Image: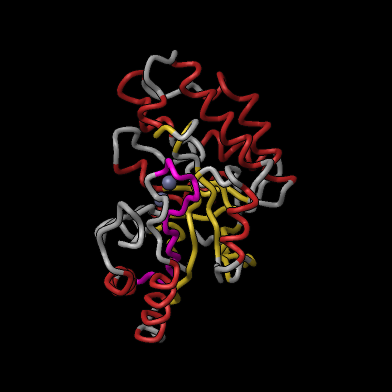
Amino acid sequence: MEYVDYHVHSNNSFDGKFKIIDMCKRAATLGIAEICFTEHFSIDPKDVSYNVLNYYKYSEEINAAREKLKDKIIIKKGLEIGEPYILKKNLEDEVKKMNLDFIIGSIHNINSLKLRLSMRNKDKKYVYSDYFDEILKMVGNSDIDIVGHLDLIKRYAYDLYGNYKFNDYKEILEEILEKVIVNNIGIEVNTSGFRNKVGETYPSMDILKLYKNLGGKIITIGSDSHDLDNIGNNYFTVTKMLNEIGFKYIYKYEKRKKTAIKIES
Ligand SMILES: [Zn+2]
Ligand SMILES: [Zn+2]
């Protein structure tokens, strides 16, 4: 089936190291048909991404890579916006000026504090529930296509508290997913969790099953690669997982309109 990666960061993100062209070349070598850059973006002055992205430069680099690799790979231009409900009106004005294919909404901070720091002196219960509360806030009030790494907090909580039990948070997760469905957005399966201690996707299989049971259909797959080695990472592991759960399609985007890709086992 068509091999795509809908979550990668180049050096246009504060934490990316590699040039767009080099990442695209690497992706093409791996047999990836389509790659979507999702550079970090925030208009919260307290966020690490504030004022980092030069949209003009980003766009030029995407155009140059498209031209150079036009027979080899399709390249999409997206953003990963942190806490997209903060300064919403200003954010929308900024985003309107850009010509984007795809937007991921993610929670990286709580009250403008990085997740790792926001957890300090909190009980396990609140570490997880505070994070899910932010996700709930986001899905009800943001102009995004997809929810990024829906249970990412487990990555930071893992050392102190271990992974969470799905049943302890089922209620709020159900509320989140119902809002996702009603608002016609989707969720991402982020494979970067396979590369750290949690050893599983963000979100977990349990969340994906719940999403399916509630009637959810819109899913993208992304590696969240910030380097050359992890582009396209574990894509087929995930398509197999999704197929087993009963999903028939994943999605790709152009100018924020989605198209289905059939999952083939
Ligand atoms: Zn993220
Ligand atoms: Zn990311």
Q: Position of residue 200 (x, y in %)?
A: 39, 38
Residue at 35 percent of width and 57 percent of height = 13
- Report if residue 236 is visible in the image: no
- Residue 88 located left or right of residue 265: right
* Residue 24 is a magenta residue: no
Frontmost residue, 53 versus 121: 53
* Residue 32 is a magenta residue: yes
Residue at 57 percent of width and 33 percent of height = 134
- Residue 64 located left or right of residue 178: left
- Report if residue 86 is visible in the image: yes
Using the rendered view, name the quadrant where residue 261 is placed: bottom right
Frontmost residue, 86 versus 161: 86
Q: Position of residue 77 (x, y in %)?
A: 48, 68
Residue at 61 percent of width and 50 percent of height = 186
Using the rendered view, name the quadrant where residue 60 is placed: bottom left
Q: Position of residue 63 (x, y in %)?
A: 42, 80
Q: Position of residue 254 (x, y in %)?
A: 58, 71
Q: Tell me: residue 155, above or below residue 94.
A: above
The magenta span reads 31-47
- Residue 50 located left or right of residue 187: left
Task: Give the colour scheme of this rendering.
Answer: secondary structure
